[in-house]
Each structure stands twice: as structure tokens, then as C-alpha cells.
Image (cartoon, helix red, strand yellow):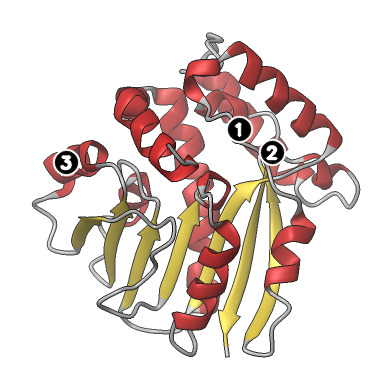
Amino acid sequence: MDRSEREIALHKIIYKDYIERRDNPVCRLVDRFWYGEMTREIVTHVKKQRIKIIDLGAGTCLFFETIKDNQNIDYTGVDSSQEMLNYAGSIYGSFSNFHSFVKNLDGDFSMREQYDVYAMRSLVHHLEHKDEFLKMLISSIPSGALLVISEPNRNFLTHTLRELLKKIKKGHFDQEHYDLSTQYFLEHFKRDDISFLGMKYFGYFSYPFSFPYILKLPIPEWCVRLFIPIDRLLSRLPIMRRLSWHVIYIAQKK
């Protein structure tokens, strides 16, 4: 099997972990914070009364939880896992602004519709054909569309810890699972048809507790509530912010 096939097979096994995390109050706190940061960028840069968002690699469509009550946002979640989208549909199917469909994005980015925002959280580093995906994505989105891409940050600290976790939790990671440098993404945004709007370092103390199926560390909810404002502060400090677990990249098609 190639990497794309292995990732699909792996998520058929571990999708229940992603479903169970939704009931974890600590995870809900971190996810609300995380998607809140992504939503803030969307609201800042997209000046429309009604916004169409497509969430690529949506999983159980956690993003929609943050925006579900806003009828001015039309959401579409896309994932290769039928199981995860079925679960999302069982929760959000009654919302008129919720849509979803199954698609393997690794090697095929053809879309029937156009959207105002193309959002993705932790998708690109799972793809075998990531270069082709990003090139096709940027080339095919309409003028004015916003890209909001949240990906693991690669620095000496987070990379070392991730490599250690891969050895400890072998059943959760593909053998080619790795983080990508900020330079990798910045190179893809060096195009005449793209305006790079910036990047936001995200996730320090609170971030690891968003993954209880990887780090089984009991932690009280009040502790994470304390971590979140600390994380906001660290993301503003010039040197310390580079030690984040994630980076949110924001770019716009000219």
C-alpha cells in the first residue's frame, strides 16, 4: 500500500479515538480555542455577509461546532473517512448550514463548487502527494478566496517529542508521519497569484491535552483554562512563540 492507502486504512481503525475525544471536556476547551483562532482570521479577512467555508480533512467536523449557530456561515466538511463524517452527520445533520462529502484529497483536488474560505487543520502532513496538493489547491481556488492552514510546527523541541511519541504510539501514526517546516509552506506561498497575509504560532501548554488518545495524562479542566491565556501570551513573544506546537498560515488568492 502507498501512504494514501495506509492513512485511510489507519483511520478506519483509530476513528473511534477521534469520536471519543469530543466528549472530553478538556479537548472541547482546547478545540474551541484552536478553531476560535482560525475563525478570527476568517472574520478579519473575509468581508462578506455570507461566507462559504470548506473544511478539508474535516474528520468529525469539529470546526462546525465553533460556527454552527452562525447562519451567515455555510460549512462543508470533506474527509476520506466515511465513518467520521457519518458521526458528524448524526450530530449536525439537522443544521441547514452543514454539508459534508467523502473524498480522498491525496492526489485529487477537483471540486464541484467554489468557496470563500479553504480551511484545513492537520491535513497536509498526512498526504503523500502534499506538493501536488498545495499547487493544485492554490491554482484552482477563486480570486479573493482565503486559505487558513493549521499545521504542526517543526522546531527542535516539538520534532524531538513527536519522534518519541511515534515510537511509543506506533499504532496511531503512519511510518511516514512527520512535521513540516515553516519554510516548506512559505515556499509554496511565493507565487504571483497569492498574497501571504501572515502566520500565527499556536499551542504551547494547552495543546498536548487535546489528544488524550496519545497522551493519557489526567489533567483538571481548570488547569487547561489557566493554560489558554498563557498560550495567548506566549504566541506574542518574539522568541518564545517559535516553540509552538502548531502554526496557522493565512494567505489569499489575488
Q: Indicate whether 4 appears above or below 69.
A: above
The circle on residue 245 is 2
Q: Residue furthest left?
A: 94
Place residue 113 in its image quadrant: bottom left
User: Could you say which disc has been placed on residue 207 in the image?
Assistant: 1
Between 72 and 59, the one lying in front of the other is: 59
Residue at image location 52% in from the left, 57% down from the top: 38
Kindly identify which numbered label has been placed on residue 86: 3
Depth check, mark 1 against mark 2: the one in front is 2
**Residue 195: image location, x then y, percent:** 66, 83
Q: Nearer the viewer, mark 1 or mark 3?
A: 3
Amino acid on which the number 1 mark rests in the picture: Tyr
Q: Is 89 or 191 nearer to us in this picture? A: 191
Task: Point out the tag, 1 or 2, that comes first from the N-terminus.
Answer: 1
Q: Considering only order in the chain, which callout, 2 or 3, is on the residue closer to the N terminus?
A: 3
Out of 71 and 128, give the one closest to the viewer: 128
Q: Label 1 neighbourhood size at 10 Å, few (<14), some (14-19), many (20+)? A: many
Q: Determine the secondary structure under disc 3.
A: helix
